[in-house]
């Protein structure tokens, strides 16, 4: 009986191996026979002549129209702005759109004042996704000699070059998508992200002044997560030294990087702690959401969590202008060799609210629990948590 089962199982295993690795022989034989029969049938079959369909050749695809709410708003403010954008970019976007454009002249002037404030003449100013160049025109009036723009849409290239940009100031690249290039490089060992960053000023000492100032409008956490990973693993963006970024982001995105422990577990996560450890951040202003295109038309907001839905609704009116910069004294309390360990430790323990820190560290570093318990900082925090005895 056992021998029969073994023989059957062996036969099944062989058939599975042949079918998965070498292909099914029986199916191959049948497919070859079917192919021969079909070829023989084709020789005896006459091909019908196709009649030309004149109506199909003259059909033209419907033109892309601008959403009515967008058209009504800009017609009341400045109708000439709409003609600067192709209609397909003004269509409604998803929540995770990564490319936004400033579409208001007054907002461009205000942002230009913020970007050029206290900016040395010899420091590079980078603008990401300038679009038709409303902000670029204002920056050229204030900081023309050391300006660089990164744009990925070909439809804006000719207009940007007519604004009087300095020589070799235009770059055709998706700068906000550098995280995607780094992800692709991790598979084949390519240099896509490094090639994108080659044109920027490179390594100075970390304690020196910042190398450049960058402006962009971001719509997802992926770009900020890439900046954190570059410091953690000390590659790519990290090689540029310290930089200064002025970013426009939604209130929901700002809450992910600026929350405190009072904000609750939904927002105050491991990535928040790592970001606040690596970067200084400051809220320096707001910009009306309607001055940025494309607009977002939420159709599935009911599926979001209650807190995220509230933050998303709050972001329909104004977005935040945030200044971030790597901490100058980062190495004083976190040596470079400990950056990856620190990020792993924080993210590991924020997976669950019930994780115990000292028992986990005992698995990583044996006999370290006693030293942590004896630590004065740990003892003081435990004494504060104790409730007074009931008399």
Image (cartoon, rainbow, N blue to C red):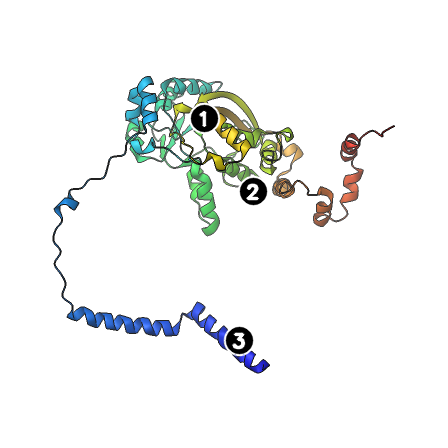
Left or right position of 262 against 296: right
At 70% from the left and 48% from the top, the residue drawn is 364
SS of the residue under disc 3:
helix
Q: Which badge, 3 or 1, comes first in the chain's sequence?
A: 3
At 30% from the left and 72% from the top, the residue drawn is 32
Q: Give me the C-alpha separation between circle 3 and circle 1.
A: 63 Å
Tag count in the figure?
3
Of residues 167 and 315, the one nearer the viewer is 315
Q: Which residue is mark 3?
A: 9
Of residues 130 and 165, the one nearer the viewer is 130
Quarter of the figure that contains the N terminus: bottom right
Instruction: Give the number of the disc on residue 233.
Output: 2
Q: Dividing the picture into quarters, in which one does residue 143 lie?
A: top left
Q: Residue 384: x, y in percent?
A: 78, 30
SS of the residue under disc 1:
loop
Quarter of the figure that contains the C terminus: top right
Within 10 Å of disc 3 (Cα), the crowding (few <14, some 14-19, many 20+) is few
Instruction: Give the number of the disc on residue 316.
Output: 1
Q: Residue 92: x, y in percent?
A: 37, 33
Q: Is residue 79 above or below residue 241?
A: above
Q: Give me the C-alpha separation between circle 1 and circle 2.
A: 36 Å
């Amino acid at each position: 009986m056992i021998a029969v089962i073994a023989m059957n199982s062996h036969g099944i295993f062989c058939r599975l191996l042949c079918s998965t690795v070498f292909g099914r022989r029986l199916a191959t034989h049948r497919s070859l026979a079917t192919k021969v029969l079909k070829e023989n049938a084709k020789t005896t079959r006459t091909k019908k002549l196709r009649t030309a369909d004149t109506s199909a050749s003259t059909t033209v695809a419907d033109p892309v129209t601008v959403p009515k709410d967008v058209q009504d708003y800009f017609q009341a403010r400045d109708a000439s702005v709409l003609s600067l954008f192709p209609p397909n970019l003004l269509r409604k976007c998803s929540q995770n759109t990564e490319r936004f454009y400033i579409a208001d002249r007054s907002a461009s002037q205000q942002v230009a004042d913020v970007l050029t404030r206290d900016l040395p003449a010899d420091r590079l100013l980078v603008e990401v996704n300038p679009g038709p160049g409303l902000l670029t025109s204002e920056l050229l009036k204030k900081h023309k000699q050391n300006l660089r723009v990164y744009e990925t849409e070909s439809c804006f290239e000719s207009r940007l070059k007519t604004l009087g940009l300095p020589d070799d100031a235009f770059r055709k690249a998706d700068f906000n998508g550098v995280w995607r290039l780094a992800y692709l490089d991790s598979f084949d060992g390519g240099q896509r992200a490094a090639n994108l960053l080659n044109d920027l000023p490179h390594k100075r000492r970390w304690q020196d002044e910042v190398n450049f100032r960058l402006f962009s409008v971001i719509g997802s956490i992926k770009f900020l997560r890439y900046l954190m990973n570059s410091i953690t693993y000390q590659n790519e963006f990290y090689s540029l030294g310290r930089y200064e970024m002025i970013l426009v982001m939604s209130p929901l995105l700002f809450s992910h990087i600026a929350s405190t422990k009072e904000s609750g577990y939904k927002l105050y996560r491991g990535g928040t702690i790592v970001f606040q450890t690596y970067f200084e951040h400051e809220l320096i202003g707001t910009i009306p959401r309607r001055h940025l295109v494309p607009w977002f038309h939420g159709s599935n907001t009911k599926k979001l969590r209650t807190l995220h839905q509230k933050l998303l609704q709050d972001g329909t009116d104004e977005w935040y202008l945030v200044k971030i910069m790597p901490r100058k004294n980062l190495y004083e309390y976190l040596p470079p060799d400990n950056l990856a360990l620190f990020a792993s430790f924080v993210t590991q323990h924020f997976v669950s609210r019930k994780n115990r820190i000292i028992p986990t560290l005992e698995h990583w570093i044996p006999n370290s629990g006693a030293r942590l318990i004896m630590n004065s900082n740990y003892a003081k925090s435990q004494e504060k948590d104790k409730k007074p005895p009931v008399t």
